[in-house]
Amino acid sequence: MSSAFPVDSTVREYPDRPIVAVGGLVIRDGRVLLVQRGREPSAGRWTIPGGAVLVGERLQEAVVRELQEECSVQVEVGPVVEVLDRVVRDAAGRIQFHYVIVDYLARWVAGEPRAGSDAAAVRWLTQEEWAGLPLTEGLGPVLLRALALAGQAR
């Protein structure tokens, strides 16, 4: 798939400034689409799909692109659920990763999830299923907010 945006050449590890990123909280039939991270930061943990915004790309466009690339699903982007920063320091205390992330509620339109190059796995999960998984820091309350916003909280 070719992109209208330039290739992302952002230095992600030990950046000189925060990287703007997006996430898509996709809910379908009471289940949330989650990916198991295949790379650092947080490799092996479950999180919502998303990634860095490319130069010239609007936030909502980045959500649509990232969900297609990372999970092979098409979505319509809804309201913002959460804005957060993720700062990860290395053993010496230096900032190894710094992301400012805007998480959006998104409605599934089409496509069956398949893990892309950044993801080790992708699954639709109920609250009971994701509650027992290793999630990225602070994700549980964000998932609950998204379910409530979507009107699918139990």
Image (spheres, helix red, strand yellow):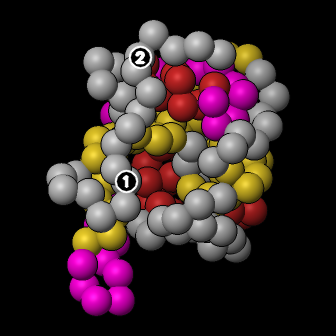
| Left or right of 13 in this view: 1 | right
- x 45%, y 10%: residue: 4
In magenta segment, residue 120 = no
Is the magenta region chiefly helix, strand or loop?
strand
In magenta segment, residue 80 = yes
Query: Which stretch did the figure color magenta?
Result: 69-94
In terms of secondary structure, where does tag 1 sit? loop
Q: Which residue is mark 2?
A: 5
| Front in this rendered view, residue 142 or 48 | 48
The mark nearer the N terminus, 1 or 2, is: 2
Image height of 25 relative to 42, above or below: above
Kindly identify which numbered label has been placed on residue 12: 1
In terms of secondary structure, where does tag 2 sit? loop
User: Disc 2 marks which amino acid?
Assistant: Phe
Q: Quadrant of the N terminus?
A: top right
Q: Are marks 1 and 2 in contact (CB under 8 Å)?
A: no
Could you say where residue 73 lies in the image, as x and y percent from the top left?
Answer: 69, 25
Q: Sort mark 2 into few (<14), some (14-19) or many (20+) by Cα contacts within 10 Å.
A: few
| Left or right of 145 in this view: 92 | left
| Front in this rendered view, residue 65 or 133 | 65
Quadrant of the rendered structure where residue 96 is? Answer: bottom left
User: Disc 1 marks which amino acid?
Assistant: Arg
Could you say where residue 115 lies in the image, as x and y percent from the top left?
Answer: 75, 43
| Front in this rendered view, residue 8 or 116 | 8
